[in-house]
Amino acid sequence: MSDSLPTNLPTQRQLVLPILDAVDKAGGEATTAEIRNAVADQLGLDETQRNQRGTIGGQDHNLLAHRIRWGQQHSKLAGLIERDGRAWRLTDTGSKHLTSAFPGRPVTVFFTPNGCALWGMAEDAASVIDPGTVRLLLTSPPYPLKTKKEYGNKVGQEYIDWLCSIIERLMPVMESNGSLVLNLGDTWLKNSPTVSMYQERTIIALQDRLGLHLCQRLLWHNPSALPVPSNYVGVERIRLKQAVECLWWLSPEDRPYADNRAILEPYSDRMKKLIEKGGAVRSKKPSGHATREGSFAADNGGSIAPNIFRIPNSGDQQYTRACRDAGLPPHPARMPIPLASKMIEFLSQPGEVVFDPFGGSGSTARAAEDLGRHWITTEAAREYVEGAKLRFSEELAR
């Protein structure tokens, strides 16, 4: 070991924005441990990188923790955060440091022949998008896991009201047979190993208030998910690691455009052999279902995909590295581009419009560009829009 820190960790100055972002997403107040975990998530660091140790000044240190502590001190000296007991709080100056959009007409930051990235509030996007032109609204809105109060109280209901009001303002831009897909993840009640019901309450509210139909629950299984919540999974060992998130597929109509032939999966070897021999023989299963002679003889190009997508989210290292090199904060919650691609292929056709009102790191935009769709994305934090722009650089283009 030596005093030299690994080159794959950002500098203390580059950690300022991720630290401020972590505190902001925690409701304006967070402990050092919460900041460290949130920053590590933003940077896509694996367990080895998070736990890497080294000798600094003759003492053994967790290198990431050491660098974040100095990043906190740098932020404190700059007047961006302040210490209050065990927690760090954003100052007024720090709150303004992450440049947020003001309500009003969004501003174009960059565009391609197929799409446009806007800096602005999600709810204001309707003012610049033609009514009835969006085939697919695909987004991952912020989860209510950064609030300081338990879900189910006034803050929790405010989240439901907030999200419903935004979607209500955006509905006019959608085609009548278009789709809305919301990627939402479970959140845990504060100081309790129990899960919030905010997702179910939000979907019920969208049905009751806006008349949206729930077409299907789609599940995203992330096999590379970390063992969180760490206290209950790794320390107390009383819960399983959270590795599945829900994609709620809704629509103004009960039969929106969709084509599962666009995302067929390869046949298994067993299925290939069944097709080769002319299909199944007549049989009756214990469940009572009967199989006709010659069933499954047709080669349809692949198997129908299940409603569970197994796609790892292993950190998106190229994006995080590009953001770090540019001195920008990587977005902390990034939908994998392959997952966005599945939704886009399934629920839209080439040339149609895909819209992400919480654009984040630009995953939806990049996937839509690659698949020949037109796209629009809005994001309230200017730094994240600039980071999304890096996805369209020659180095990160897929």
Image: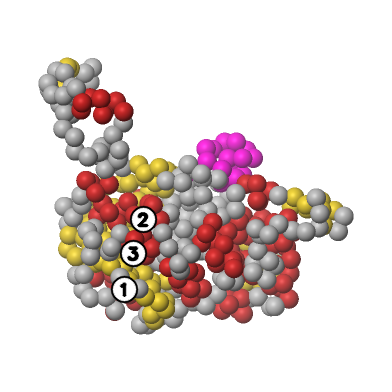
Residue at the image point whose x is 51% and y is 61% from the top: 319
Spatial CA distance of label 2 from label 1 is 20 Å
Q: Is residue 145 magenta?
A: no
Residue kind at label 2, given as amino acid type: Ala
Classify the position of the C terminus by image quarter: bottom left
**Residue 384 visible in image:** no
Q: Nearer the viewer, mark 2 or mark 1?
A: 1
**Does 220 appear above or below 121?**
above
Instruction: Using a 10 Å C-alpha cutoff, classify the residue at mark 3 as few (fewer than 14 neighbours), some (14 to 19) or many (20 or more).
Output: many
Q: Which residues are magenta?
A: 227-242
Label 3 or label 2, whichever comes before in sequence order: 2
For label 2, the residue is 340
Q: Position of residue 94 (x, y in %)?
A: 61, 76
Front residue (pair 326, 170)? 326
Front residue (pair 251, 294)? 294
Label 2 or label 1, whichever comes before in sequence order: 1
For label 1, the residue is 113
Q: Position of residue 258 (x, y in %)?
A: 20, 52
Q: Secondary structure at mark 3?
A: helix
**Does 265 appear above or below 353?**
above
Residue at the image point whose x is 43% and y is 51% from the top: 185
